[in-house]
Amino acid sequence: MAFEKNILVTGGAGFIGSHVIRLLINKYPTYRIVNLDLLTYAGNLENLSDIDSAENYTFEKGDIVDTDFVNSLFEKYDFDGVIHLAAESHVDRSIEDPMSFIKTNILGTVNLLNAARSNWKDFTGKRFYHVSTDEVYGSLGETGFFTEETPYDPRSPYSSSKASSDHIVRAYYHTYGLPIVISNCSNNYGPNQFPEKLLPLFINNIKHEKSLPVYGDGKYTRDWLWVMDHATAIDVIYHDGKNGETYNIGGNNEWQNIDLIHVLCEIVDDELGREKGSSKKLIHFVKDRPGHDKRYAIDATKIKNELGWEPSIQSEEGLRLTVQWYLKNTAWMENVTSGNYQKYYDKMYADRV
Ligand code: NAD
Ligand code: TYD
């Protein structure tokens, strides 16, 4: 079958990438979607098991840092566009092992940019979309929001690696005219997230009656976005965003960690039929994360006014759907927490608890 467009999605076996792939496969049957993923600990093809036999889906296992491999894919598929999500994504891991973040997030991004630049003879109709995070802006005080004009001030190895890659993507626009677009999004939640991030980790720990390690005083604020809303934003930006532009994406849904955790505990108690208040007893305040950003909050006016995108779900509803998904998908959770998971987790938290 001849496809109208060939699109490379990197990191499609991960949390957000799997939702993006599913949306594109179902919404655009005339596009061929090629998923390039290394299947690191965070990548899981089970996240795509419902669509992996679709005619317009192809999986390619490989490393975005591998120049020859990336170039061979550009030659093989003649991509019209790239939606780049592959990354090392967990702040705590970046504190333990910054180099793997520098390699994948910075060198991998440059490698993809070079492949696009050298393989795309003519940039007309092409697009390189770099998916990034609001953490590049650093930390807010009690008030205010990140806008697209907020100066970058990253604090963790993760956020600084993403900030570096954002700058390089913009440099390729200004220097070589590569048609790029960038988005910076707040914390996502929903199905398929590896249980090292706050919500899936805590749901799984509650289920097994394990301690819930709340960093510091728990009075850190994040703006939570339902992951499928992020996927729809990415679709809209990929198709309607303007070259060279940045779009902030947020849920307009700020929570202090401790308040969110309390609500989560109540929902899990309810879903598991446990006595009200029992999960809260698992909360333990532990040593803080070094360089912990106090507050993130997004001003998403630009994407709303220019592209008409808004989040569809607010967190109480999304939280319950999230809890139900992790409690129901026990085989998924058992698979991703088998192997080295418990050993890694125990080591990571040994000096915190
Ligand atoms: P994730 O860790 O769940 O998935 C990352 C995926 O990238 C995995 O499938 C992994 O196998 C793959 N990958 C890692 N290194 C690779 C390499 N060298 N080559 C090829 N594939 C590789 O991450 P996520 O939470 O889905 O985040 C996706 C993107 O969105 C990242 O760029 C992240 O910075 C950004 N982002 C995430 C959030 C969030 O809340 N999770 C918020 C804003 C932006
Ligand atoms: P996380 O899910 O790691 O996302 P990010 O650091 O990218 O925002 O963490 C969300 C918030 O929850 C953050 O303020 C750190 C906090 N947190 C805990 O208190 N305990 C935990 O075990 C984890 C993983 C996170």
Image (cartoon, grey):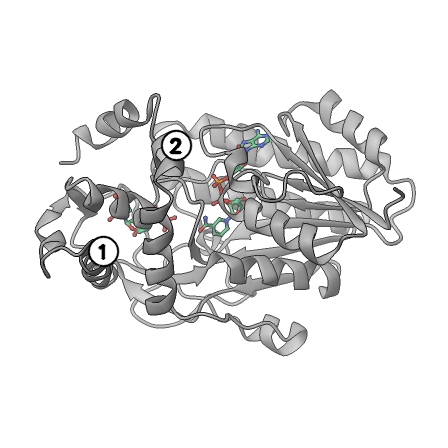
Q: Please give the label number shown on residue 138.
A: none
Measured as percent of width and height from the top left, residue 93 is found at: 37, 33
Location of residue 350 in the rendering, given as x and y in whole percent from the top left corner: 17, 28
User: Quarter holding the N terminus?
Assistant: top right
Q: Which residue is at the front of the view, 221 or 143?
A: 221
Q: Which residue is found at the position 27% from the left and 48% from the top? A: 203
Marks 1,2: beta carbons within 8 A: no
With 147 as the anchor, is 61 left or right in this view?
right
Query: Picture coordinates of residue 222 (x, y %)?
Result: 35, 60
- The answer to whether any part of residue 66 appears in the image is yes
Toward which corner of the image does residue 271 lie, by quadrant?
bottom left
Task: Point out the tag, 1 or 2, that comes first from the N-terminus.
Answer: 1
Q: Is residue 265 left or right of residue 225?
A: left
The residue nearer to you, when weighing 205 against 100, is 205
Q: What residue type is labelled 2?
A: Val
Q: Which residue lies at the image location 19% right of the left edge and 48% below the top edge?
A: 214
The residue that disc 2 covers is 336
Q: Callout 1: helix, strand or loop?
A: helix
Q: Which amino acid does label 1 sit on?
A: Val
What residue appears at the point 38 percent right and 60 percent down from the top-left corner? Answer: 321
Question: In what quadrant of the picture does the C terminus appear?
Answer: top left
Label 1 CB less than 8 angstroms from ligand 2: no
Q: Distance between the residues labelled 1 and 2?
A: 20 Å
Q: Name the residue under label 1.
A: 268
Residue 170 in sight in this render: no
Judging depth in this view, the residue of 167 and 112 nearest the camera is 112
**Above or below for 28 versus 37:** below
Left or right, 228 with reference to 96: right
When the figure is inspected, residue 214 is found, relative to residue 302, above or below; the finding is above
